[in-house]
Image (tube, helix red, strand yellow):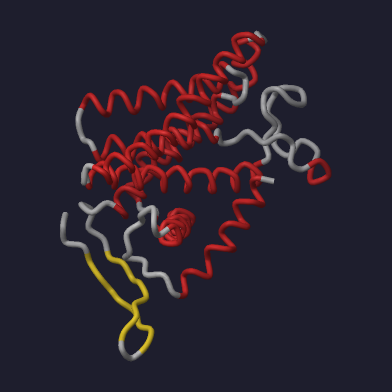
């Protein structure tokens, strides 16, 4: 249901592409602009494989090898971890708090405080964090239902992919981890906007806590959180680099002119 809800949201938002200016700022009073930014970023994220270069192989190859090794080790890792309902409940609460509630609350509070104190950096960070988390959530739902890997608490506990074909789809899909993806996308935005060792340490420590907690709660396999963490980190970097006022990028948007609707090509030289 979350998968279809995400695509329904996209179907409602896409018509705004016809009239909403891509260069407008996402603010509380302009939710359609925020939705448009999410859709635009989602399109860019989905098209990112076409922009892969030879240099990207230096991290793509290790990531692929690490993911394959983790998948091979997943079942053994969960058997070694064992079953402990009390521990699982405790770490599930930790992951929900640090991976969902805290980032969402911090984003909302940061926006309100930044707006009231005229702190543009804080308000922008809050907006970019929310956009990155939304992009992560939407992409995660599509990947989960496409990969259809059973979670460690279902089936024979080995994390089979499409265990019974389309007849039982979806089979409680768990790859990638949504908590890990959301937490790491938020951490990347915050640590890039506030480029200090203390901020980076706190943000990435919280994200790491979320990833580890999802395994200890037996909600995900190690490879699930590995893929979710890497994807979230990349999404956060993409959103921050594209939307930040300090970023330099080319944008194409529609604009109203005395002669009717037109196109506007702009480049941000702030960087």
Residue nearest the viewer, comparing 226 with 28:
28
Q: Position of residue 147 (x, y in %)?
A: 64, 42
Give the residue furthest to the left.
Answer: 270
Picture layout, residue 129 above or below residue 215: below
Q: Residue at x 59, y 16 (%)?
A: 77
Give the residue furthest to the front.
Answer: 116
Q: Residue at x 44, y 57 (%)?
A: 31
Q: Is residue 14 left or right of residue 233?
A: right
Picture layout, residue 4 above or below residue 266: above
Q: Position of residue 155 (x, y in %)?
A: 77, 26
Picture layout, residue 258 above or below residue 80: below
Q: Position of residue 195 (x, y in %)?
A: 21, 35
Q: Position of residue 179 (x, y in %)?
A: 52, 32
Q: Is residue 12 left or right of residue 236?
A: right
Residue nearest the viewer, comparing 203 with 235:
203
Q: Quadrant of residue 202?
A: top left
Q: How many numbered discs sit on the rendered protein? A: 0
**Looking at the image, can residue 50 be seen?**
no
Q: Residue at x 55, y 20 (%)?
A: 93
Q: Quadrant of the C terminus?
A: bottom left
């Amino acid at each position: 249901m979350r998968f279809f809800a995400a695509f329904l949201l996209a179907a409602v938002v896409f018509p705004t592409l016809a009239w909403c200016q891509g260069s407008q700022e996402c603010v509380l009073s302009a939710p359609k602009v925020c939705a448009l930014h999410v859709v635009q970023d989602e399109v860019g994220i989905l098209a990112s494989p076409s922009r892969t270069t030879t240099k990207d192989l230096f991290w793509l190859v290790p990531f692929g090898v690490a993911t394959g090794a983790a998948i091979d080790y997943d079942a053994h890792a969960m058997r070694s971890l064992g079953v402990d309902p009390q521990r699982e409940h405790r770490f599930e609460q930790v992951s929900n708090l640090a991976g969902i509630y805290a980032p969402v609350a911090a984003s909302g509070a940061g926006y309100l405080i930044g707006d009231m104190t005229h702190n543009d950096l804080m308000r922008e960070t809050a907006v970019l964090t929310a956009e990155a988390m939304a992009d992560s959530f939407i992409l995660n739902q599509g990947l989960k239902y496409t990969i259809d890997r059973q979670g460690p608490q279902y089936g024979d506990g080995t994390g089979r992919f499409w265990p019974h074909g389309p007849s039982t789809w979806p089979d409680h899909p768990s790859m990638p981890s949504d908590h890990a993806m959301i937490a790491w996308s938020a951490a990347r935005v915050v640590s890039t906007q506030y480029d200090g060792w203390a901020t980076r340490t706190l943000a990435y420590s919280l994200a790491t806590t979320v990833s580890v907690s999802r395994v200890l709660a037996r909600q995900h396999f190690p490879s699930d959180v590995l893929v979710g963490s890497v994807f979230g980190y990349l999404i956060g970097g993409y959103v921050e680099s594209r939307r930040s006022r300090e970023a330099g990028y080319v944008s194409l948007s529609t604009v109203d002119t005395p002669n009717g609707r037109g196109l506007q090509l702009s480049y941000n030289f702030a960087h």
